[in-house]
Image (tube, rainbow, N blue to C red):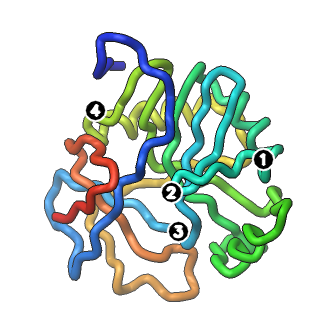
Amino acid sequence: MPYIFAMPVHPVFVRPCIPAEVARPPQREDWIHEPKFDGYRFQIVKNGREVRLFSKSGAEYGARFPRMVDAFGDLPARAAVLDGELVFFDAKGQADFRQLHNQMRTRWPDETQLVFMIFDLLHENGADLRGVPLSERKRDLNRLCRKADVPFMRQVEISSMAPHCALTPPSSALKVSCGSASTAPMSPGQPKSG
């Protein structure tokens, strides 16, 4: 795994990259696409056994998700920053934003109904990976997820084919598709389009 900085860095919350809305997805071969579920953007920041959960604005939610915090403590990495989406799946396996919103309004959300859908690895074991191409971060994320036994997490599947956003039925778990150039570094907070 390449190191971006000469000295190891501590994992911290990273302001997420904001996707840009475009009329048509890029059709270039070097782009990968992944589903955007109807959920809340979240980050998991692990440093040793300490685990913190953050919303996209940087608000901390760890105290409200004790089982999730405990489970991510077992992630097979000393330190990591995982970028993803907290999703409520109904009994049919469909993302349900209304139910997620209702759960998030309670003091103790029902963690058994929630899944952290991970789509990026921004830090691992002292290495800031944001300058590493997305394709390499996805490879490292896949390796980490295969070794992990965390019931609340799933890796988001990617495709190198341009998505058919207009064909996605409104009732499906898929909201839209997000795409990025596979060679691109992570650019926090900046909308990107093709």
3D distance between C-alphas at marks 3 and 2? 15 Å
What numbered label is drawn on residue 132?
4
Q: Quadrant of the C terminus?
A: bottom left
What whole-number distance in Å separates the C-alpha atoms at marks 1 and 4? 32 Å
Q: Can you say whether 123 is above or below 63 in the image? A: above
Q: Which residue is mark 3?
A: 37
Q: Earlier in the sequence, mark 3 or mark 1?
A: 3
169 on left or right of 76? left
Q: Quadrant of residue 132?
A: top left
Which residue is denoted by mark 2 in the rendering? 56
- Give yes or no for contact between labels 1 and 4 (Cβ–Cβ under 8 Å): no
Single out the mark in the foreground, 1 or 4.
1
Q: CA distance from mark 2 to mark 4?
A: 21 Å
- The residue located at (32%, 18%) in the rendering is 3
Q: What distance separates the C-alpha of mark 3 from that of mark 4?
A: 25 Å
Residue beneath disc 1: 63
Instruction: Give SS at disc 4.
Output: loop
Local SS, label 1: helix
